[in-house]
Image (spheres, coloured by chain):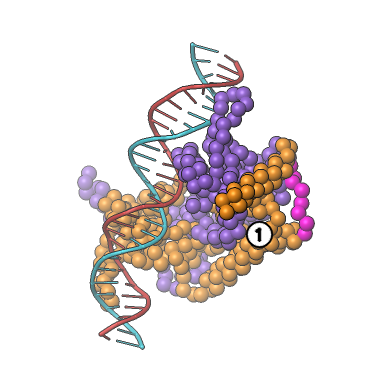
Chain colours: A purple, B orange, C red, D cyan
DNA sequence: CTTCGCATGTAAGAAGTTACATGATTGT
DNA sequence: ACAATCATGTAACTTCTTACATGCGAAG
């Protein structure tokens, strides 16, 4: 239930409504490391209120009244307790690009062009993110404390390393295909045969039908 | 439904059973970027078979017979099609440690020690993973083709960057707390006040009860 | 002869997403 | 008056995990 804690965390930044929380996850710093939709936020807020970790009050000021949530003593405590728990190691990495690369040699061995396109897209998106972070640190609007800054440095460091890797990888893919590093059972050759056989069989069935 | 594709991908490596797939996700290379439990694998295999993307045959050889799955022509095609789709950008990063750091200043501002412990744990685990990858590349058992090697390089590059960041961060945390980078609305001070008030209120209610 | 690892599954439920329904306020 | 944005919620559905149930084969 780490998402309850993410909600508590956002409320700890400032008393806020369900809508505010959604916005924070979309545009704010919390959005870099977590995300939530309305369908999750509102039921969870109700639940947290029932548990006594947050309480609600109305805004009196101008504009449409909205429900603001604030942490109770127990809520601050629950948040601090969660922070104290050792965090889990982030494996498996959930990255579609990496997952695809792993199976590239098996299903798309000859199409190195498309993979290069994927990598160029990734580079563009990462550069954009770096840019976004850079302007954000100097926009004079968002609160960024020492700890928030540490997270931003982490992301920057990883993205920088990623960019170096992307360039090296594209250069390699533009050259000739490399032999396997290790393949004691000759799987690579077997894959080619199995794939060709399955595709040929499908073809022949198609033509039979016609 | 990227998990269907992950299953297709593993089967593309070699014809395998549900159990084999689970093992591959636990110890194999696919486990670095995805993970699945039996409860997901078996129903999905059944579904993929109904869709005609995989087909099953029994092992005849010694030992307990098991169901082996193999890709059909349509299965190879579906896998290749998925690879061709541009991958999604992996934001938000789902990393418990980063999420905790973001809220550290708000709920646990004075306890820099515990955060340092979290970071040391992370360093130890990352070093272990680097080690695991290093031995794996030279164990002479697993198949690692050019593309698999690219993924391993990526992970190595990110982990190296992470380790540098961890050391710098620990050094910083051992020093005195830094002021916020940016805090136009004075939120940091407000947080201290709100937190202290909520905790004090809880305390006074506790003592009243006693 | 029994325990451990291999192997296949099911059922219940948690967790989270999407789409829908509703309505107020603000700016044009 | 109209659209865009702010704002709160519900319902149905998908996805995925955990725990349970079952049984074979091999090794000690």
Q: Is residue A192 left or right of residue A35?
A: left
Residue B9, x across and y down, in percent = 41, 57
Identity of the residue drawn at 78% across and 57% down: B176
Identity of the residue drawn at 58% across and 45% down: A72
Q: Quadrant of the C terminus of chain B?
A: bottom right
Residue B63, x across and y down, in percent = 28, 76
Badge 1 is on which residue? Answer: B115
Q: Is residue B135 left or right of residue B28?
A: right
Which stretch appears magenta?
A: B175-182
Q: Secondary structure at mark 1?
A: helix
Judging from the image, mark 1 belongs to the subunit labelled: B
Can the viewer see residue A82 in this picture?
yes
Magenta stretch, main secondary structure class: loop
Whether residue B99 is in magenta: the answer is: no
Query: Which of the 4 image quadrants contains residue B155?
Result: bottom right
> Which of the two residues, B184 or B87, is positioned nearer the viewer here?
B184
> Which of the two residues, B99 or B123, is positioned nearer the viewer here?
B99
Please tell me how crowded label 1 is: few (under 14), some (14-19), or many (20+) other residues with Cα within 10 Å.
Answer: many
Instruction: Count numbered badges in the picture.
Output: 1
Identity of the residue drawn at 48% across and 55% down: A99
Residue occupying the far left of the picture: A209
Identity of the residue drawn at 64% across and 43% down: A13
Residue B87, x across and y down, in percent = 50, 47
> Which of the two residues, B41 or A193, is positioned nearer the viewer here?
B41
Residue A12, x across and y down, in percent = 62, 44
Can the viewer see residue A190 in this picture?
no
């Amino acid at each position: 239930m780490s998402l309850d804690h993410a909600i508590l965390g956002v409320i700890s930044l400032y008393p806020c409504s369900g809508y505010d929380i959604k916005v924070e996850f979309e545009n704010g710093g919390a959005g870099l490391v977590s995300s939530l939709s309305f369908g999750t936020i509102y039921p969870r807020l109700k639940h947290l209120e029932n548990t006594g970790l947050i309480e609600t009050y109305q805004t009196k000021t101008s504009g449409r009244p909205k429900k603001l949530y604030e942490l109770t003593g127990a809520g601050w405590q629950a948040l601090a307790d969660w922070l104290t728990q050792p965090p889990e190691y982030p494996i498996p990495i959930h990255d579609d690009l990496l997952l695809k690369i792993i199976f590239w040699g098996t299903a798309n061995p000859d199409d190195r062009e498309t993979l290069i396109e994927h990598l160029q897209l990734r580079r563009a998106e990462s550069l954009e993110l770096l840019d976004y972070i850079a302007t954000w640190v100097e926009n004079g609007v968002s609160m960024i404390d020492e700890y928030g800054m540490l997270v931003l440095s982490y992301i920057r460091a990883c993205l920088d390393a990623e960019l170096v890797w992307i360039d090296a990888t594209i250069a390699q893919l533009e050259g000739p295909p490399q032999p396997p590093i290790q393949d004691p059972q000759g799987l690579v050759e077997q894959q080619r045969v199995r794939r060709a056989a399955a595709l040929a069989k499908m073809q022949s069935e198609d033509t039979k039908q016609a």
